[in-house]
Amino acid sequence: PVKGPSLNMRSLHIPVFAISFWASFAHAQVQWWQTSSSTGDKLAEKGTLSFDTSLHSQSDSSHAVNIDPETTFQSILGFGGALTQSSATVYKQLPDELREELIQSYYGEGGLGFSIGRLPIHSCDFSTESYTFVGDDADKDLATFDDEVTYDQSLSLPLIKDALAAAPDLKFFGSPWSPPAWMKDNNNMLYGGKLLDEFRQSWASYFSRWIKAYENQGVPVWGVTVQNEPEASQTWESCLYTAEETRDFVADYLGPTLRSDHPDVKIFGFDHNKDHIKDWADVLLAEDSASKDFIDGIAYHWYSGACFDNVKASFEAHPDAMLLPSEATYELTVLDDDESSEDWLRNGTYTKGEGYGYDILGDLESGAVGWTDWNIVLDQDGGPNHVGNYCDAAVVADVKSAEMTLNYHPQYYYIGHFSKFLKEGAMRVKSTVDGVEEMTSDCVWPYGKCDGTTIHTTAFSSADGGMTVVVMNCGDDDKEMLLTVNGVDGTLSNVVPAHSIQTYVLE
């Protein structure tokens, strides 16, 4: 059997039941799972609970969670992470048994159930070097384009194909960090710069050629983003666009090219921080916007703060567009004061798991269709990275020790409380804590930090009628929860330990 993280889970079955008959499930069994720093649970199955019809009052110390299944919002697309060149480099160094363990941990039947994957279109900062699939000299007609994507055949594609073999329905979306240097006004893939007007069609055609090349390698491409972090000039691969420039590029070049060559491929705009998501969504998706008919959704990152109010405003203004969190991670610049590098490598930092959980939960409550982690695996240094931009990851491999190991950090388990249970088509339903819907939502609240003053929750009904509820407590004290579901008799009572997350599946 393949070894992996200790999840202590039986195979999950979400039963079928109709909304109109929920009242008959007052005494049904509720399966639940928990991750907690105080108990040591890591996505551990905890048995069953039942709704109790004798519970009618709430104590001063308890928190009332109410689910209203008749008020519905967005549907789930999926959860996943980025299969970067750095992740592929680490993967290539692992022995066969650890490669299989990693794949199964994310994509296998007993793993996290990842269903989406982000693919860099040629190099990014999490590569060991800069590269493209065309020559170094101006080649407007892309005569030198490598349709065999030879560089990726020896690096990224083995990882991508192994993931796809374990999860054949994976939805991959590609993101470019920079066009080739000769297409830009600074003649450099690094340090920002802009796409030159005379190469806009060449760049749009490059997208199309890359999609076709990957399809020829047996990797279907479900979608693309127009540009990674278009507002940032970085020391690594980057390219600057305004929202208006993106609109015009999509309307006049990328949109028509992909609709002609790959009509089913989704196009996502923005792919940068939440603080400006509404501004960009309004430009790209306004009724009179030239790009509206080509843009399927808005991708975004978490680095500007919680900003859940901005996401919600975008969802309310453009309800037909998919809002997809496309990147989140912690830069590996500081460790906790009491944390050694060895402690971090083996155990990770628990608050980073909570930060992931808080962001996922808040994004979902604000209208997101899923959530995408950054690198699925990195090495013991938080790399490799060709510009020294080292980061944490949900799985960190120690490839320098005599006995290589995979180390599962708290982020892995926190993502799993969502990804393992919320499948494509699940629909968010209204949930409140003590009568309040809102979470700490402005951009002043730092990214990756959790509000521990109360418990937080989100709830989804599955396409076949089941229900999943996620509850999170990142405070220092245990909190009593009293869960009610409109239309179901009784109350489900449980303790949510300090620094824990729980997933409930109603039968």
Image: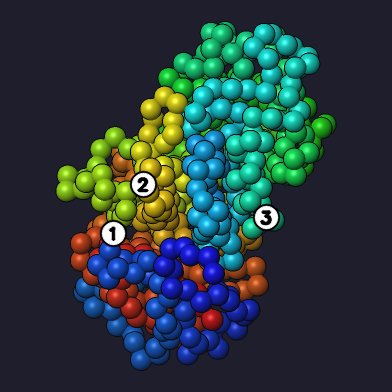
Which mark is in front, 1 or 2?
2
Q: Position of residue 75 (x, y in %)?
A: 60, 57
Nearer to us of marks 1 and 3 is 3
Residue 251 in percent (x, y) is at: 71, 25
The residue lying furthest to the left in this view is: 338
Q: Secondary structure at mark 2?
A: loop
Which one is in front in this view, the residue at disc 3 or the one at disc 2? 2
Mark 1 vs 2: CB contact within 8 A: no
**Farthest residue toward the right?**
260
Residue 336 sits in which quadrant? top left
Q: Is residue 257 left or right of residue 479?
A: right
Residue drawn at the location 65% of the way across and 72% of the way down: 464
Horizontal and vertical percent for residue 102? Answer: 51, 55
> Label 3: which residue?
165
Above or below, comparing residue 262 to residue 23 in the picture: above
Q: Position of residue 505 (x, y in %)?
A: 50, 74
What residue did someone put label 1 on? 474
Task: Using the numbered discs, state the Cα–Cα distance from disc 3 to disc 2 in whole angstroms.
Answer: 29 Å
Mark nearer the N terminus (3 vs 2)? 3
The answer to whether residue 276 of the structure is visible from this angle is: no
Query: Dot 1 lies on which element?
Result: loop
Inspect the image, locate mark 1, and give the three-letter code of the amino acid beneath it: Cys
Nearest to the observer: residue 143 or residue 460: 143
Mark 2 lies on residue: 401
- Name the amino acid, label 3: Ala
Position of the C terminus, as image quadrant, is: bottom right
Quadrant location of the N terminus?
Answer: bottom right
Q: Which of 358 and 56 lies nearest the eye of the viewer? A: 358
Neighbourhood count class around disc 3 (C-alpha, 10 Å): few under 14, some 14–19, many 20 upward: some
Q: Is residue 150 visible?
A: yes
